[in-house]
Image (cartoon, grey):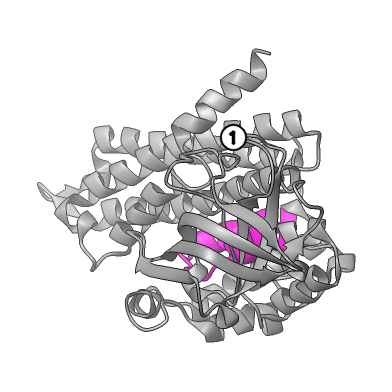
Amino acid sequence: MDFKLTDEQSLLRDGLTRFLSTRYGLEKSRAAAKTGAGWQPEIWHAFAKELGILGAALPEDAGGIGGGAVEMMLIAEALGHALVIEPYVDTAVVAAGLLRRACGDAAGALLERIVSGTAVVSLAATEATSGEFWQDVTTKAVRDGGDWLLTGEKIVSASTPLATHVLISARTAGERTDTEGISLFLVEIASATSNIEFHHYRTVDDRRASDITLEGFRVPATALLGDEGAAWASLARARDEGAAAISAEAVGCMRKVLADTVEYCKQRQQFGQPIGSFQVLQHRMVDMYMEVEQSAAAVLLAILKLDEDESTRAQAVSAAKATVGRAAQFVGQQAVQLHGGMGMTEELAIGHYFKRLTALQFEFGSTDHHITRYGRLTTR
């Protein structure tokens, strides 16, 4: 495949890379992750005001600058390389895509706020009983006069502790696993003061997430995004877009891990010579390199297929996510082993990247889930 970036795409990638190398230190970001709000709001505002990346992958009619999936891939990979914890994928990819497809004045206004950096939007789609399947929705939404009452529980809603708004999927019709009858509701978190409970926590990879309990939580009719009961197609696409984006992020993580491992093996001395001179370790690093490059190729194919029909898109995304999942496990484990005991400490970057690569294997569908889905899609 002969794929070349445009001049604008190269400038976007290079500008973001320079910004992160000079203004996004790992030590400071880890300290922010473990204390206070769990992120650096000033970095988020710089993403919007100085770099414009929060709208770079959005079309102009959505308040963006006319980019698309390739721009999203470049941004996600650069953020992965720097191990950025700010919620780009959750807000500027997943939530922004859902809002753009929902249309309407409320969705459009919130999209503009995402692009300007004044709003952070998360998605609450998973439930304790749903496992890998977002269409398995037991949270109910019933009409009460001109309002809706939401009742149910959502788990592991990524980035909700950082968010100003959350999108909640709920069933307005149909049976538990039906794709028809699922609706999407927009909730402003600051105004959610009764009949809703947020349990915030820090995840193993220093991100923030929430479990949400709704007990007859009242929202106005305007909180319904799009047509009643017709949110599944948009949710399915959002999940594929999120999977493609974090796969690109994983490629950035793995490139950094590989580079750090090669450098470490050049410096670490054993038996009077660098351990990188030992052929068996060179073979390991070559295997790591091959896994990274295969992942990058699979991600690029998925990115280029995001606008195809649902089946084609799903096949490419599942192939990429499964390839990346396998590679993330292999590259992360090999990097830790080659660093020895230091690889699991907080002192070296490698331990932090290893935890992120581990978590990435399960976001937007696990490796096993995507292997199964790919098999199902290709044997029809």
Q: Does 121 appear above or below 246?
A: below
Q: Indicate yes or no whether the magenta region holds residue 374.
A: no
Q: Residue at x 68, y 48 (%)?
A: 235
Q: Residue at x 64, y 13 (%)?
A: 379
- Tell me if mark 1 has few (under 14), some (14-19) or many (20+) residues whose alpha carbon lies within 10 angstroms of its own: some
Q: Quadrant of the N terminus?
A: top right
User: What percent of the width, then of the height, locates residue 69?
Assistant: 74, 52
Q: Residue at x 43, y 34 (%)?
A: 326
Numbered range of the magenta stretch: 70-97
Does any portion of residue 159 appear in the rendered image? Answer: yes
Residue 51: image quadrant is: bottom right
* Image position of 92 (left or right of 90): right
Q: Nearer the viewer, residue 21 or 146?
A: 146
Q: Which residue is mark 1?
A: 177
Q: Does 320 appear above or below 150?
A: above
Query: Is the stretch drawn in magenta largely helix, strand or loop?
Result: helix
Q: Indicate yes or no whether the magenta region holds residue 88.
A: yes
Q: Given the current orientation, which residue lies at the most extreme front position?
A: 145
Q: Residue at x 56, y 68 (%)?
A: 217
Q: Does 301 appear above or below 349?
A: above
Does any portion of residue 57 appear in the rendered image? Answer: no
User: What percent of the width, then of the height, locates residue 327?
Assistant: 44, 37
Residue 236: image quadrant is: top right
